Structure formats: C-alpha cells, structure tokens
Image (spheres, grey):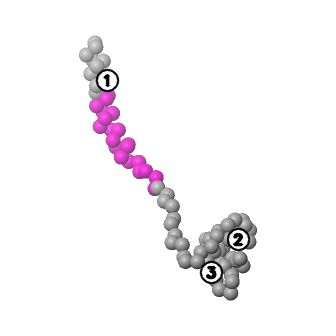
Amino acid sequence: MITAILGGLLGAALIGLTVLPRYIGGRRLAAVRTARFYTVPDGTRWLVCDNAGVCGRMQTRHVPAGDGLWRCTTDGCGYLTKGD
C-alpha cells in the first residue's frame, strides 16, 4: 500500500518536473526601461521656464539663443526667456 502511494507521489513529481519548464520558459520577462542620458551643451544654464503648460515654471536647462535670450531644452518646450 505504501509502495503504491509513494510510487504515485514520485510519478506525479516526475511528471511535474518534465512539464513545469515548458511553462516557465514560455513566459518572457518584461522589457527593462532605461534612463535617457543627454550630453549637456556648453554654456547651459538652469533657469526658470515661464512655459507653465510644459515645464510648470520649474528650473530647466536652457542653452544660449543669442541676443541675451535662452532657449529651454525640455522636450516639447523650446520657450525663450531672458537670462541674468
């Protein structure tokens, strides 16, 4: 009797070990999101951006745009502001 029970348990474990890797290998890991890195251009300043719709009046990177103006480098902004 015990032999039949142990044989059934051992058989179920053996079947589980042969079938389980198929389910584990079938799933793929989610893609890892990586950070974006940018090179900072020479002369870059951190100034308050007056474009409330995109930057929300936060200090963002601005590059020289000529005539004492600075252009915001935030994605989708490009707002010009005067620098001190």
Could you tell whether 68 is left or right of 41 in the image? right
Q: Main secondary structure of the magenta part?
A: helix
**Direction front: furthest residue:** 84
Q: Which residue is drawn at 64% across and 70% down?
A: 46
Q: At 28% from the left edge and 19% from the top edge, which residue is drawn? A: 6
Q: Nearer the viewer, residue 1 or 29?
A: 29
Q: Residue at x 27, y 21 (%)?
A: 7
Q: Position of residue 78 (x, y in %)?
A: 65, 76
Q: Give the residue pinned by disc 2.
A: 49
| Amino acid at pointer 3 | Pro
How far apart in space, not on screen, are marks 3 and 1 (Cα)?
75 Å
Above or below 28: residue 68: below
Q: Name the residue under label 3.
A: 64
Q: Measure how far apart labels 2 and 3 are at the Cα level.
A: 14 Å
What residue occupies the far bottom of the structure in this picture?
A: 67
State which mark lies toward you, 2 or 3: 3
User: Circle 1: is it few (<14), some (14-19), or many (20+) Cα within 10 Å?
Assistant: few
